[in-house]
């Protein structure tokens, strides 16, 4: 496949920069700074050092033996992004962008957050680098993820409740962009996924590709060959893009993105952007969007606040339409079952987001032979979700006495 | 000749600045919106911006967001907004109408179908706030072919882009008064006059200023340096306050009169 994006930020027809004029120079400056620093050995060394010494990379590629045996098919490997500092892959990107913000001379950062993982990762890097940080979070998500709100406060960040629209991730993104339009002169926006206007989809992918770069080396080292499948959950799609990207040129490796089907793709309550969405412009780029026939963006639903988003990164749209990757839906119920199975077989409580990738693996692995390999991105740990899961599982919380 | 150009030419002879109010079409419903548009013309509006309601209005502050929500509750679509222009013409509205829409509703409508439909419906201009020059080539060509002016926005942050944007502009150049989204504000970007001078030097077209203008004093301040003053949120807020009056047949005229008085007051 050809190198994407092109100079105008296009992945095939997808991507671009559909933003108010007020932001255009800021995006051009950001692109210029990013291209400059991405070639600067000093910048690269600082990012690498932090990923290693601060976040604990490389994360392990763990052979989930008991899960594989239980599923009775392919060997399942878990790329343990949950072992990162702050508990998810999000820190890979905030370290990169935080260091970039500092090099660009910005003293204030802003971020949007859904589940709170990107917010916590941004607050963390702000504390570490001495930057002032505001995190925009939907009021609804603040209720679902109270612990992460408190974490961000502990880290010295301000959490700004978003009360417009759906009061979830979609509107948190809108409010962050609106705030940025007003404070573009001194504020750096750390966007948390491979979404938004160019250069974010490219830049966030580049900061997240370490997941796939490591996993590719680790599986070659472990098994002497590439996997048959790479599976990852997609909301905006940053952990998926990060693990997919280094495998894109490996034709034999099937790439499987797992999106949230919520209460089912046949209902109105899902976040299955690829399965049910159409091409459209949303929050700065052309990609797949959940929308009605008039182009009004529809609210998404997922048990997982991190996947509860009606858009998806443009490079995923490109991978889908070119046939290089496939995207499948997993319901709330399937994700909850998968979360419990992984907890009981491997002693790993995954984040609800990552549980979607596990659920697809539960479907996939038994259809494969024992000499086939599935690598799953375990993008985050479930600590943040434990309280919510307790609510969803109702009375079952007492059964484990 | 495009009606926008004719209007600016006439105003220039009269030594006047255009007052361009913005309304969200269908706020709070289609028929009321039509009455408001007629009232705006009677109260001295020189052109009207017709805002297409959208679920994710990135460039707009809370006042226009709420107007969008009200209109969307009335199920107003892009096609309804075009029909509004047609109805306004049928009911005698003669001033230029400018459609203000985010890009996605147009994209989903289909660009060709959209331009086929708006030709001869009384729409003279088009503003798409999330379509910067880097992305507008196709739309610009189709607007040109349809004799509809694609009016670009320039911002205080545009700097060296001002010249490039102005070169491609039609109708007038819309100067964003300050950083930020739409909404009433008490102060403006400190370099606003320098910014307006830069734009003036970059184009022979009229220049308009908008975002945050809400009072007669502010209109007056910008009349001296601009050819058009756009007032959005302040009028939309008047409409919002008048909604209870507008919804009751007995007080409807009272509500329309309040909106009319506000606009006439801006005009001075």
Image (cartoon, coloured by chain):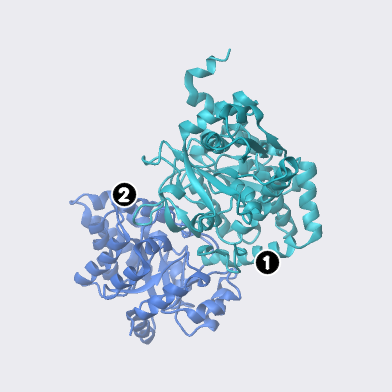
Residue B142 spot, x, y in % from top left: 39, 76
Q: Which chain is cyan?
A: A
The numbered disc on residue A32 is 1
Q: Secondary structure at mark 1?
A: helix
Q: Residue furthest left?
A: B250
Write down the quadrant of residue A6 in the picture.
bottom right
Residue A275 spot, x, y in % from top left: 43, 48
Location of residue B243 with respect to A116 vertically, above or below: below
Q: Quadrant of the N terminus of chain A?
A: bottom right
The numbered disc on residue A360 is none
Using the numbered discs, state the Cα–Cα distance from disc 2 to disc 1 in whole angstroms: 43 Å
Disc 2: which chain?
Answer: B
Location of residue A62 with respect to B140 vertically, above or below: above
The residue at which mark 2 appears reads as: B73
For label 2, count other residues whose C-alpha is less than 10 Å away and answer few (under 14), some (14-19) or many (20+). few
Q: Which chain is blue?
A: B
Q: Quadrant of the C terminus of chain A?
A: top right
Same chain assignment for discs 2 and 1 = no
Residue A395 seen in the figure: yes
Would residue B80 be found to the left or right of residue A88 on screen?
Answer: left
Q: Residue at x 40, y 60 (%)?
A: B234
Say which of A105 and A249 sits in front: A249
Residue A386 seen in the figure: no
For label 1, count other residues whose C-alpha is less than 10 Å away and answer few (under 14), some (14-19) or many (20+). few
């Amino acid at each position: 496949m050809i190198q994407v994006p092109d100079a105008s930020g296009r992945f095939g027809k997808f991507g671009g920069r559909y933003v108010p004029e007020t932001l255009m120079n800021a995006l051009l400056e950001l692109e210029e700074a990013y291209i400059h620093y991405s070639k600067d050995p000093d910048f690269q060394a600082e990012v690498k050092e932090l990923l290693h010494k601060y976040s604990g990379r490389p994360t392990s590629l763990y052979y989930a033996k008991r899960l594989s045996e239980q599923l009775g098919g392919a060997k399942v490997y878990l790329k343990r992004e949950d072992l990162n500092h702050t508990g998810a892959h999000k820190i890979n990107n905030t370290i990169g962008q935080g260091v970039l913000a500092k090099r660009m001379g910005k003293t204030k950062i802003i971020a949007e957050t859904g589940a709170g993982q990107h917010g916590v990762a941004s607050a963390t890097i702000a504390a570490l680098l001495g930057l002032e940080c505001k995190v925009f979070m939907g009021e609804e998500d603040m209720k679902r993820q109270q612990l992460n709100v408190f974490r961000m406060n502990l880290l010295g960040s301000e959490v700004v409740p978003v009360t417009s629209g759906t009061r979830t991730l979609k509107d948190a993104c809108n409010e962050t962009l609106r705030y940025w339009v007003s404070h573009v002169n001194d504020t750096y926006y750390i966007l948390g996924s491979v979404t938004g206007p160019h250069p974010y989809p490219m830049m966030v992918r580049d900061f997240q590709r370490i997941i796939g770069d490591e996993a590719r080396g680790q599986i070659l080292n472990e098994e002497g060959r590439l996997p048959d499948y790479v599976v990852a959950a997609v909301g905006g799609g940053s952990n998926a893009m990060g693990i997919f990207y280094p495998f894109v040129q490996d034709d034999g490796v099937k790439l499987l993105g797992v999106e949230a089907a919520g209460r089912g793709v046949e209902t109105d309550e899902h976040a299955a952007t690829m399965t049910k969405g159409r091409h459209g412009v949303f929050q700065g780029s052309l990609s797949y969007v959940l929308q009605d026939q008039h182009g009004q963006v529809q609210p998404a639903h997922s048990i997982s606040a991190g996947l509860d988003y009606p858009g998806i990164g443009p490079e995923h749209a490109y991978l889908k339409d070119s046939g290089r990757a496939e995207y499948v839906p997993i319901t709330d119920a399937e994700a909850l079952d998968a979360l419990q199975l992984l907890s009981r077989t491997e002693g790993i409580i995954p984040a609800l987001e990552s549980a979607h990738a596990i659920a697809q693996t539960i479907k996939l692995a038994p259809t494969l032979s024992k000499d086939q390999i599935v690598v799953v991105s375990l993008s985050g740990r479930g600590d943040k979700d434990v309280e919510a899961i307790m609510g969803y599982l109702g009375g079952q919380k007492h059964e484990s006495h | 000749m495009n009606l926008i150009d004719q209007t600016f030419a006439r105003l220039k002879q009269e030594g006047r600045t255009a007052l361009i109010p913005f309304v969200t079409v269908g706020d709070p419903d289609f028929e009321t919106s039509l009455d408001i548009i007629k009232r705006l013309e009677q109260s001295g509006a020189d052109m009207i911006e017709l805002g297409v309601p959208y679920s994710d209005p990135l460039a707009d502050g809370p006042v226009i967001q709420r107007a969008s929500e009200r209109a969307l509750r009335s199920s107003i679509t892009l096609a309804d907004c075009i029909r509004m222009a047609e109805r306004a013409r049928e009911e005698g509205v003669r001033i230029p109408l400018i459609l203000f829409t985010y890009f996605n509703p147009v994209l989903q409508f289909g660009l060709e179908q959209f331009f086929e439909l708006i030709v001869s419906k009384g729409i003279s201009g088009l503003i798409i706030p999330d379509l910067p020059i880097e992305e507008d080539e196709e739309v610009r060509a189709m607007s040109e072919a349809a004799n509809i002016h694609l009016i670009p926005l320039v911002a205080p942050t545009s700097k060296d882009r001002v010249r490039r944007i102005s070169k491609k502009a039609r109708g007038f150049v819309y100067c964003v008064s300050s950083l930020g989204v739409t909404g009433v504000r008490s102060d403006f970007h400190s370099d606003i006059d320098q910014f307006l001078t830069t734009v003036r030097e970059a184009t022979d077209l009229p220049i308009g200023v908008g975002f945050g203008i809400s009072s007669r004093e502010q209109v007056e301040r910008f009349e001296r340096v601009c050819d058009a003053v756009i007032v959005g949120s302040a009028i939309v807020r008047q409409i919002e306050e008048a909604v209870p009056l507008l919804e009751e047949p007995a007080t409807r005229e009272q509500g329309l009169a309040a909106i009319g008085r506000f606009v006439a007051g801006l005009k001075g």
